[in-house]
Each structure stands twice: as structure tokens, then as C-alpha cells.
Amino acid sequence: MDIRSYISSGILEHYVLGRLSPQEEAEVEKFAEQYPEIREELDAIEVAMEEYALLHGRMPPPGVLTAILERLHAEHKVAARPVGRRLRILGYAAGLLLAAAVAGLLAAYQMNRRQSADMAGLNQQMASLQQSCDSVQAVAQQLERSLDFVRQPATRAVVMQSTGLSPGAVATVFYNPESRRSLLGVGQLPPNDAEKQYQLWAIVGDRQVSMGVFDYQEGGEPLREVEFVPDANAFAVTLEDRGGSAVPTLEQMYVLGNNT
């Protein structure tokens, strides 16, 4: 059963207004018991119509409410189903006197449902757009902070050239001993696979000190923060097993540059 099509057909509104045959009403009540979505929608319609009738209703002419009550009482004996809320709704609605008012209510209700769905879609699009804007703004702010660091007088750009293992490989360490910060910018390296990672090294005297591991894929990346190592004489990048190595694999050194 297509529940959404059944709900949007208008049969539930006609049920609340008592415009269905006994067989059709029995079918609505059976579906309301089987499907929670139909029960919830039916309750929502009843509440909306009751509130509207309470707001706009007036005392019906003599005999109108009595006739409605007698009809509902007879139906209740035959079908043995609860009619308390429907009784109140029809009683108040009788005071409106004009069927056009009820038809207007149904049209407004359906329009509100459609507008709510449209609004939900627009809100979702706005949230997605806001998230994209926030991401772009975060990247722009990170780039601005990196440029400010690079422009500082104490920042030195140490270019690491290819060792010949991969012609054209190049990377740069931006090194600032005053602020004790370092940034790494990779110009070109062969992309690493899932089992390998690049590792950046600072050469201090005769020691090689790890400054961290990183992955690289084609397309370029923004400057990344790396560990600061004081008194570095040079920098190098090697390709190691994922997670890094305690000592550099010299046969896998891709770039090297002196900090002079």
C-alpha cells in the first residue's frame, strides 16, 4: 500500500468531516490501526479542524446539532467505534453554516503541508550551502595565516631539491627559529600508496630527527604544520613504511635542502 498517496488523497479529511460511507469509514479505521503514519495524520487533521472550529464557530441553528448527534449515535451503535473528537468537530463545524469555509480549511491545510515540505527542502539546501561556505572560509583563513607566517622576516624558505630518485621532486620547509614554528609545502612528489608514507627529517649535526610523516597525492596541498626542530642544518624527505621509521632510509630519500 502506498501510504503517502493514500494520505494525500483527501480521504482522511472527508472521514473527519463525516462525508464517507460506512464502508469507507470502516476502511479508514482499519488502515489507521494497521499503519501508525495514517493514525498520526488522522489525529493531526482532527486537532487542526477542532482548533479552527473552536476559533471561528458559532452556535448552530436549533435542531442542526441534535440531528448531527442522532446520526453519530446511530453510527456508533452499528460500528462501535470512538467518535468523541469527531462529534465535537462536527458540532462546532455545523456552526459555520457554510461548506465553503470547511473547503477553505482543507485547501489551506493541504497548502500548508506542501509549503512545509518545500520549506524543509530549502532549509536543507541552505544548511548544505552554509556548510560549504564555512569550509571555504576555513581554508581561506588557514591560507591567510600561512601567508602571514611566510612573510615574517625571521622565516626562512629552505627549498629541498630532487636527489635524482624522482626528477622534478621538490618541497620547501618554512623555518622560523624566533617563533619556533615550521611549515612544509610540497611542490611535487610521487603519490604514495596505502602501505607507505613520506617522512620529513631535520639534520642536526650528525643526527637525523623526525619532523613527522605525511601522505601526498597529486593535485597539490596547502602548507602543513610540522614539528619544529631547533638548530637544523638541513632537511630531507624519505619514503618509509606507514607510520614512519626511527632512522631515515637513505636509499629512499627524494629531496634534500640545506638550511643556510
Image (tube, rainbow, N blue to C red):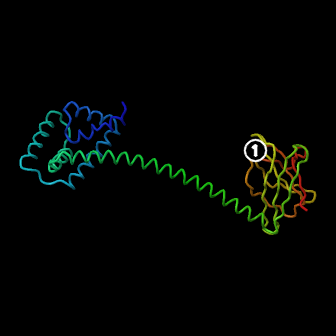
Assign the N terminus to one quadrant of the image: top left
Q: Which of 141 and 85 lies nearest the eye of the viewer?
A: 141
Kind of residue indicated by mark 1: Glu
The x, y position of residue 166, in whole percent, is 87, 43
Left/right placement of residue 111 relative to residue 219 reads: left
Question: Residue at the spot x=46%, y=49% of the render?
Answer: 122
In the rendered image of this protein, does residue 183 appear above or below residue 106? below
Q: Which of 110 and 142 lies nearest the eye of the viewer?
A: 110
Question: Residue at the spot x=20%, y=54% of the render?
Answer: 54
Mark 1 secondary-structure assignment: loop
Left/right placement of residue 117 relative to residue 218 reads: left
Q: Which residue is mark 1?
A: 218
The x, y position of residue 158, in whole percent, is 86, 59
Assign the C terminus to one quadrant of the image: bottom right
Question: Residue at the spot x=26%, y=48% of the render?
Answer: 105
The x, y position of residue 21, in whole percent, is 19, 32
Left/right placement of residue 30 relative to residue 95 reads: right
Numbered marks: total: 1
Residue extending furthest toward the right: 206
Q: Which of 73 and 100 lies nearest the eye of the viewer?
A: 100
Quadrant hosting residue 182: bottom right
- Label 1: how many Cα within 10 Å (few below 14, some 14–19, many 20+): few
Residue extending furthest toward the left: 62
The x, y position of residue 99, in whole percent, is 18, 45
